[in-house]
Image (tube, helix red, strand yellow):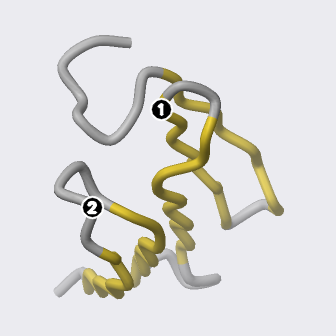
Amino acid sequence: MTGNAEGDMISLKRVNANTVETTYKLKGKVTVVNVRTVSADGKTVTVTTKGTNAAGQKVDNNLIFEKS
């Protein structure tokens, strides 16, 4: 994978019917993990990001997207 400063490898794992976990690794070490969850009614997506970014800063973010 090229063009992503957070990793040279990406893996996706389906946790359940509504959730996918994406793991970024750089030189074999986990840098960032994203968990995306779609609500049961399909109207909300929650993205949780945890890890360390390319600048070495800790990342702990939650994004919520709602369909209007």
Q: Residues within 10 Å of mark 2 (few under 14, many from 20)?
A: few
Distance of mark 1 from mark 2, alpha carbons? 12 Å
The structure residue drawn at horizontal position 43% and vertical position 21%, both measured from the top left corner, is 8
Residue annotated with mark 2: 56
Position of residue 54 relative to residue 38, above or below, is above
Judging depth in this view, the residue of 57 and 15 nearest the camera is 57
Horizontal side of 6 relative to 35 (left or right) equals left
Image coordinates of residue 30 in percent, x first then y, are 59, 48
Residue annotated with mark 1: 26
Amino acid at pointer 1: Leu
Judging depth in this view, the residue of 3 and 21 nearest the camera is 3
Image coordinates of residue 10 in percent, x first then y, are 53, 30
Question: Residue 63 is drawn in which quadrant?
Answer: bottom left
The structure residue drawn at horizontal position 53% and vertical position 25%, both measured from the top left corner, is 27
Horizontal side of 66 relative to 12 (left or right) equals left
Callout 1–callout 2 Cβ contact below 8 Å? no
Mark 1: secondary structure? strand
Image coordinates of residue 59 in percent, x first then y, are 33, 76
Image coordinates of residue 42 in percent, x first then y, are 49, 75
Amino acid at pointer 2: Gly
Position of residue 29 relative to residue 58, above or below, is above
Question: Residue 68 is drawn in which quadrant?
Answer: bottom left
Judging depth in this view, the residue of 10 and 43 nearest the camera is 10
